[in-house]
Amino acid sequence: MNDIIGIAWYKDELIYRRALDIFTDSRNMPATFKGWKTLVERQLEEIKRVGNIAIRVDMDPETFTDWCIARGLQPNAQGRVAFVNHAVLEHERTGEGTIIE
């Protein structure tokens, strides 16, 4: 059985910049949208190479912030992982979500 791997997805540079503004650990993220895109492309190659499936988890900064607050999480790497894992579980339960080809 293939594993489903969630990828935090920023649809454009504006969203990425807004996300960096709210992340408490933005210094650990690529400084630019282009840098993030390059990193994700490498991750996707590896995910596919080993036979796993990647799903896109859209990261709207405001939705993410609200989600973290409701769960007592910080908007940082731990919060992002929890958010993405939640989306993967929802995908497994409902089949909804965007598979990255």
Image (cartoon, grey):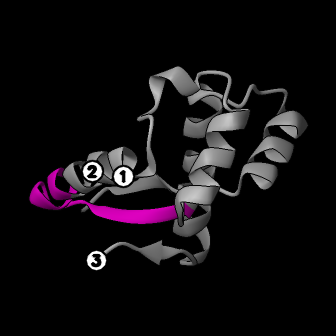
Q: Residue at 31% across / 56% down in the picture?
A: 3
Which residue carries the number 3 mark?
A: 101
- Asked which secondary structure carries label 3, the reply is loop
Quadrant in the picture for residue 32: top left
Q: Are marks 2 and 1 in contact (CB under 8 Å)?
A: yes
Horizontal and vertical percent for residue 34? 36, 52
- How many C-alpha atoms fall within 10 Å of the one at disc 1: few (<14), some, or many (≥20)? few
- How many C-alpha atoms fall within 10 Å of the one at disc 2: few (<14), some, or many (≥20)? few
Q: Nearer the viewer, residue 4 or 1?
A: 4
Mark 1–mark 3 Cα distance, whole angstroms, equals: 19 Å
Q: Which residues are magenta?
A: 45-57
Is 40 displayed left or right of 47 in the figure? right
Instruction: Work out whether 19 lies above or below 77.
Output: below
Mark 2–mark 1 Cα distance, whole angstroms, equals: 6 Å
**Is any part of residue 33 visible from this angle?**
yes
Amino acid on which disc 2 is placed: Thr
For the N terminus, the image quarter is: bottom left
Which residue carries the number 1 mark?
A: 34
Instruction: Work out whether 46 lies above or below 29.
Output: below
First of labels 1, 3 by sequence position:
1
